[in-house]
């Protein structure tokens, strides 16, 4: 169904030649408003100390909710910049597996829109996955965060990274394999902390998911870190 109160607390640092074990911990769920709320954490260990990297409440439901009727499909702009331009200018650090933006269509001060790809089946990314198909599409989600990095370069002349998400709701059982269209509405950009709402549509204009209260931090110091993207 979705999640709430997602917070990034500390990045996962992997030293050259080292291995890091990361665990996902889930607490017992509690029923609230007809949904099962399950607190989850992403953690690792530093010696005897447990380090929490992120946390959220996952919302479980027996059936998917109906998409809000007041959210209209965006008008299409098929003459945007293609993936070669998006990933060929040094503004993004992502390797080939995460080249999820197919074409940027809009990048104004208040709106960002792009065609994005869908992730391959879990077996191509994970050894012995628990499921054969994704419930939410990780590449489409990451591509939307990449779109915000491109927005911050365009309008703030600096890179950005996500740090929180207030609410995520999904209205389809799965994202289409043919890819989706993402539209982002910037809701606040008056400081280093930028907030936005993210809409995921299928290529026919149907609403797949809605991410509200996305937060990212714009920081000029990230430019050097982005260039150090090879071990």
Image: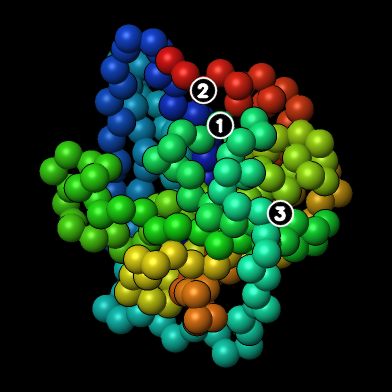
- Quarter residue 49 falls in: top left
Classify mark 3: residues with Cα within 10 Å, few (<14), some (14-19) or many (20+): many
Percent from the top left, x then y, of residue 205? 54, 81
In this rendering, position of residue 226 left or right of residue 156 = left
Q: CA distance from mark 2 to mark 1?
A: 6 Å
Callout 3: SS: strand
Percent from the top left, x then y, of residue 152? 74, 43
Q: Name the residue tied to disc 3.
A: 195
Please report contact status of discs 2 and 3: CB closer than 8 Å, yes or no: no
Q: Residue 221, labelled with which disc?
A: none
Please report contact status of discs 2 and 1: CB closer than 8 Å, yes or no: yes
Task: Say which residue appears at 76% left-offset and 27% top-offset.
Answer: 220
Q: Earlier in the sequence, mark 2 or mark 1?
A: 1
Q: Name the residue tied to disc 1.
A: 93
State the quadrant of the C terminus. top left
- State whether residue 213 appears in this view: no
- State whether residue 108 appears in this view: yes
Q: Name the residue tied to disc 2.
A: 229
Callout 2: SS: loop
Q: CA distance from mark 1 to mark 3?
A: 22 Å
State the quadrant of the N terminus. bottom left
- Looking at the image, which is closer to me, 43 or 226? 226
Percent from the top left, x then y, of residue 51? 40, 26
Q: Nearer the viewer, mark 1 or mark 3?
A: 1
Q: Earlier in the sequence, mark 2 or mark 3?
A: 3
Q: Residue furthest bottom?
A: 69
In this rendering, position of residue 89 left or right of residue 1 = right
Q: Residue furthest right?
A: 190
In this rendering, position of residue 153 left or right of residue 97 = right
Q: How many marks?
A: 3
Please report contact status of discs 1 and 3: CB closer than 8 Å, yes or no: no
């Amino acid at each position: 169904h979705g999640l709430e109160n997602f917070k990034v607390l500390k990045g996962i640092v992997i030293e050259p030649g080292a291995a890091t074990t990361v665990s996902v911990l889930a607490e017992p769920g509690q029923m609230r408003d007809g949904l099962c709320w399950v607190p989850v954490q992403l953690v690792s260990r530093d010696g005897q100390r447990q380090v929490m990297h992120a946390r959220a409440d996952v919302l479980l439901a027996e059936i998917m909710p109906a998409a809000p009727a007041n959210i209209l499909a965006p008008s299409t702009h098929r003459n945007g910049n293609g993936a070669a331009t998006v990933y060929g200018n040094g503004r993004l650090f992502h390797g080939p597996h995460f080249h999820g933006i197919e074409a940027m269509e809009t990048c104004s001060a208040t709106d960002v829109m792009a065609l994005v790809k869908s992730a391959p089946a879990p077996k191509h990314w994970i050894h012995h996955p628990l499921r054969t198909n994704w419930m939410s599409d990780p590449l489409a989600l990451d591509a939307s965060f990449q779109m915000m990095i491109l927005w911050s370069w365009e309008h703030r002349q600096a890179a950005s990274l996500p740090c929180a998400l207030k609410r995520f709701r999904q209205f389809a059982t799965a994202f289409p394999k043919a890819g989706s269209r993402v539209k982002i509405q910037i809701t606040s950009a008056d400081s280093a902390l930028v907030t936005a709402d993210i809409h995921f549509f299928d290529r026919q204009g149907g609403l797949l998911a809605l991410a509200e209260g996305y937060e990212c931090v714009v920081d000029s110091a990230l430019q050097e870190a982005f260039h150090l993207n090879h071990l």
